[in-house]
């Protein structure tokens, strides 16, 4: 009788509080993709803002279909290849009914929560190739990339038997490896495949709408609380600590970026404030469940300072990362993942400690191996996918499309009546004449 009672007590049961919080967190993370669309849309020039919005929004649909068909099963199914990928037992969400649980929450909810991560990661990559990618090629790229890059890395980091999780022992609470470093390395690969924009390093390519950028950054910050604190998978003290760490790092990231701008350029900018907050949030993503509040403040500050310099590397190294996916997400993700090896505290990790807290170099070494492996894999596979698509159908828009703007030539729309067509131009006539000329290229 006693044995049966103890066994029943250890059996996971649905917790309504945890479920309610994860439902809210899932909605918050999904909102990050429209937030990213606004953030990116404000940063491009007027003639391609709608195309930028579309690249994010269409990722929601494409990744959802792939994730439900096979992505979730391969990422979180039982390991089937030595820590590299899961099995297909739950392909098409088979066997995962309303009563199925992942810990204390419904498995279907956990799968949906993880889906929102996959969506925003794919959308992040688009910022590296803004203003010059064929929309049709993007439609092909996203599902292939999600299956071949995002899904395997997610299994390595969070899946049952994943080699980074269970063999290497590196820590990543909310996605520094599968989200930030993967998107940044993939963005670098794609911008090398497509080449620089027309006028890169010659023409001014300033954000066309800074209020839109700030609104997008605000929505991202709001959603990030679900992204990080939701990863605790429960309404508990860990979620509260992660929530506070997320807020703190975003603030010090913002301040660090502005400090650099003031010292280097003499002007703290609105774009810098938005970018700095995002850099701090990127860096705290992997470390939010491992560091103390002091550690979070340092992680955010380090990202804000370093990333503010990193975004200029593209001009020296001649890769056109249009919206600084490499400078913010790759560099910020590396910073946050590595600093776990310095600032991890036992109170958060329930075991591992960083170098500065007496843990030695072991954890830092594990973090470095994980960073190198994920970055190399994501870059290599994405470069291969990009090259294949480029040879098969062309990945780069034509010069005429890029010069005129992708909004008009691809989508037959403009964000602003006078922003592209000129004052008083008849919109319908202009759209018709241009689209008739370039429809075959779209």
Image: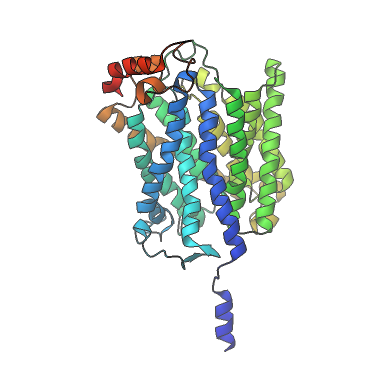
Residue 133 in the figure: left or right of residue 423:
left
Task: Give how far across and how far down residue 95 sits, in percent.
Answer: 38, 65
Seen in the picture, residue 368 relative to 10 is either above or below; the reply is: above
Identify which residue is drawn at 28% across, 18% down. Answer: 436
Instruction: Tell me the quarter of the picture where residue 299 sits.
Output: top right
- Residue 171 can be seen in this image: no
Identify which residue is drawn at 51% across, 52% down. Answer: 113
Q: Which of the pair 109/323 is nearer the observer?
A: 109
Residue 210 in the figure: left or right of residue 406:
right
Residue 385 in the figure: left or right of residue 285:
left
Task: Give how far across and how far down residue 292 sits, in percent.
Answer: 71, 48
Task: Give how far across and how far down residue 48 sits, in percent.
Answer: 45, 22
- Residue 155 can be seen in this image: yes
Seen in the picture, residue 239 relative to 389 is either above or below; the reply is: below
Instruction: Tell me the quarter of the picture where residue 391 sits.
Output: top left
Identify which residue is drawn at 50% across, 33% down. Answer: 37
Q: Which of the pair 58/13 is nearer the observer?
A: 58
Check the picture and name the quadrant holding the C terminus: top left
Residue that protrudes farthest toward the right in the picture: 294
Check the picture and name the quadrant holding the N terminus: bottom right
Task: Give how far across and how far down residue 328 sits, in percent.
Answer: 56, 31
């Amino acid at each position: 009788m006693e044995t049966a009672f103890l066994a029943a007590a250890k059996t996971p049961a649905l917790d309504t509080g945890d479920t309610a919080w994860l439902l809210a967190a899932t909605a918050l993370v999904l909102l990050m993709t429209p937030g990213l669309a606004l953030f990116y849309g404000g940063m491009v020039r007027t003639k391609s803002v709608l195309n930028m919005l579309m690249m994010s929004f269409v990722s929601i649909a494409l990744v959802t279909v792939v994730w439900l068909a096979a992505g979730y099963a391969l990422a979180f199914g039982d390991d089937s290849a030595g820590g590299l990928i899961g099995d297909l037992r739950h392909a098409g969400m088979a066997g995962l009914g309303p009563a199925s649980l992942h810990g204390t929450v419904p498995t279907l909810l956990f799968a949906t929560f993880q889906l929102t991560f996959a969506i925003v990661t794919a959308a992040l990559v688009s910022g590296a190739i803004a203003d010059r990618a064929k929309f049709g090629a993007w439609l092909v790229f996203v599902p292939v990339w999600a299956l071949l890059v995002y899904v395997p890395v997610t299994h390595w980091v969070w899946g049952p038997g994943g080699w980074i999780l269970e063999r290497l022992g590196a820590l990543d609470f909310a996605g520094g490896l599968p989200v930030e470093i993967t998107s940044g390395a993939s963005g670098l690969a794609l911008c090398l495949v497509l080449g620089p924009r027309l006028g890169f390093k010659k023409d001014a390519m300033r954000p066309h709408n800074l209020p839109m950028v700030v609104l997008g950054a605000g929505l991202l910050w709001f959603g990030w609380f679900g992204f990080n604190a939701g990863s605790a998978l429960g309404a508990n003290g860990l979620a509260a600590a992660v929530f506070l760490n997320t807020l703190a790092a975003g603030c010090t990231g913002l301040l660090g970026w502005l400090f650099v701008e003031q010292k280097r350029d003499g002007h703290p900018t609105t774009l810098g404030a938005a970018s700095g907050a995002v850099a701090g949030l990127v860096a705290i993503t992997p470390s939010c469940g491992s560091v103390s509040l002091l550690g979070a403040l340092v992680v955010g500050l380090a990202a804000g300072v370093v990333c503010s310099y990193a975004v200029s590397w593209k001009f020296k190294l001649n890769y056109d990362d249009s919206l600084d996916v490499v400078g913010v997400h790759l560099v910020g993700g590396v910073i946050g993942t590595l600093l776990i090896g310095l600032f991890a505290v036992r109170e958060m990790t329930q075991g591992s400690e960083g170098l500065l807290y007496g843990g030695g170099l072991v954890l830092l070494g594990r973090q470095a191996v994980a960073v190198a492996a994920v970055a190399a894999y994501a870059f290599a596979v994405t470069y291969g996918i990009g090259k294949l698509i480029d040879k098969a159908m062309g990945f780069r828009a034509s010069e005429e499309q890029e010069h005129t703007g992708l909004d008009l030539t691809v989508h037959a729309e403009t964000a602003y009546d006078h922003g592209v067509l000129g004052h008083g131009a008849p919109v319908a006539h202009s759209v018709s004449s241009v689209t008739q000329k370039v429809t075959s290229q779209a």
